[in-house]
């Protein structure tokens, strides 16, 4: 039997973890990885609180049960909302399209004349245009549907795996084989990096909600503009802000659409403000996250830039976590 030194074992653990983390991108398993880490961390956070009420490992099982109930309830709400929308459309065919055309007609009188030709003249014309576009891009739409289904399935599998890992008993350190012990150390640093980034993202979501709330509830009313669903939009801004990068894009789109219901200029003003805030938050994000992982703002921005260039939008989401993990490894080796 060949004998391996501690240095060889450590090097092998680095190769295995680095290779696994990079394979996440071509295999499109980033949602699964993040979902698994999130469930694992939430169980570990909830367990000490529940142990005050229930002794032993039952507290950990209860934490998993609570999270499972929340996930199932959330999915049930989504499906119920989708079914309700479909039933409403079946009872009132074209109602949503007619509401959209009201917004378009309102915007038509406020846009420059040269843009008027790009707007649909009626709901029937718009319906035909949508049908033609869908026929031309049918293959792309099918691909989007497959990607969405793949992401949904991998998310659920990641959550289940995270829960299973959280329920496993941690073996005694002295009983671990050398490579298993080294891999456990790598994974511990990865989970720690993920935890730091998640808490930072919560702070970022709160800041985003504060800035958006000031704009919607204070700035716009000062100019006599009262946006519908203001409270709902503020709550959605926080919830969506928990999703790195894409969350802000979704919330900004919703606010702009609601602004269109009043006038095109309210929508443009809201979008301009949100773009400025988004750019400001880009640097605040780097500062807050950098504080959690002891990294300077430029380091994190550079890491996000490199990961975005290499892996696209998934790279922007994973970049801070991967860099936080890399920083933890370098600090442990006393290289930084």
Image (cartoon, helix red, strand yellow):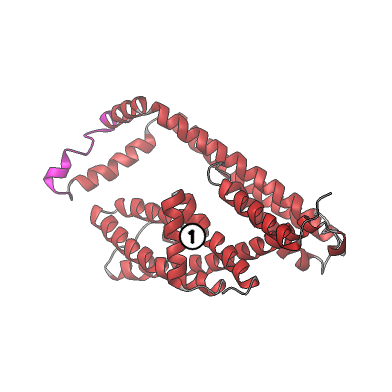
Residue 94 located left or right of residue 325: left
Q: Which residue is mark 1?
A: 241
Find residue 166 and report its horizontal and vertical position in percent. 75, 55
Residue 105 located left or right of residue 286: left
- The answer to which of 131 and 302 lies nearer the viewer is 302
Q: Relative to 320, is 134 above or below?
A: above
Marks counted in the figure total: 1
- The answer to which of 219 and 161 lies nearer the viewer is 161
Q: Does residue 208 appear in this view?
A: yes
Among all residues in the image, which is located at the extreme left? 113
Find residue 161 and report its horizontal and vertical position in percent. 71, 47
- The answer to which of 43 and 1 lies nearer the viewer is 1
- Point 62% across, 75% down: residue: 334
Find residue 205 and report its horizontal and vertical position in percent. 49, 65
Q: Does residue 80 appear in this view?
A: no
Secondary element under disc 1, as helix, strand or loop, is helix
- The answer to which of 187 and 41 lies nearer the viewer is 187
Q: Is residue 121 magenta?
A: yes
- Point 31% across, 60% down: residue: 270
Mark 1 crowd level (few <14, some 14–19, many ≥20, 10 Å Cα): many
- Point 31% across, 66% down: residue: 220
Q: Quadrant of residue 255?
A: bottom left
* First to last magenta residue range: 110-125
Q: If the image is split into quadrants, where does the C terminus sit?
A: bottom right
Find residue 37 and report its horizontal and vertical position in percent. 65, 55
Q: Is residue 261 magenta?
A: no
Residue 330 located left or right of residue 96: right
């Amino acid at each position: 039997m060949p004998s391996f030194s501690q240095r060889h074992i450590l090097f092998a653990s680095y190769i295995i973890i680095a290779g696994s983390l990079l394979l996440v991108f071509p295999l499109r398993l980033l949602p699964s990885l993040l979902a698994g880490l999130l469930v694992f961390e939430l169980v570990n956070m909830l367990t000490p609180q529940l142990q005050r009420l229930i002794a032993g490992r039952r507290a950990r099982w209860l934490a998993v049960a609570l999270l499972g109930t929340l996930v199932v309830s959330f999915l049930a709400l989504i499906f119920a909302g989708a079914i309700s929308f479909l039933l409403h459309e079946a009872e009132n065919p074209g109602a949503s399209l007619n509401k959209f055309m009201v917004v378009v007609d309102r915007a038509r009188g406020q846009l420059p004349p040269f843009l008027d030709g790009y707007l649909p003249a009626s709901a029937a014309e718009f319906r035909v245009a949508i049908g033609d576009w869908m026929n031309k891009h049918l293959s792309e739409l099918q691909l989007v549907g497959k990607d969405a289904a793949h992401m949904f399935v991998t998310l659920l599998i990641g959550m289940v795996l995270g829960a299973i890992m959280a329920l496993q008993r941690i073996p005694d350190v002295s009983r671990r084989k050398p490579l298993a012990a080294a891999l456990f150390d790598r994974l511990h640093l990865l989970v720690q990096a993920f935890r730091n980034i998640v808490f930072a993202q919560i702070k970022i979501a709160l800041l985003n909600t504060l800035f958006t709330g000031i704009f919607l509830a204070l700035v716009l009313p000062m100019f006599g503009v009262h946006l519908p669903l203001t409270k709902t939009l503020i709550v959605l801004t926080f919830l969506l802000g928990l999703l790195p990068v894409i969350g802000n894009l979704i919330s900004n789109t919703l606010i702009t659409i609601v602004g269109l219901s009043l006038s095109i200029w309210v929508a443009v003003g809201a979008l301009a403000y949100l773009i400025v805030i988004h750019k400001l938050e880009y640097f605040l994000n780097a500062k807050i996250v950098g504080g959690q992982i002891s990294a300077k703002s430029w380091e994190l921005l550079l890491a996000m830039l490199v990961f975005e260039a290499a892996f696209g939008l998934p790279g922007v989401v994973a970049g801070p976590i991967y860099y936080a993990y890399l920083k933890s490894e370098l600090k442990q080796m006393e290289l930084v």
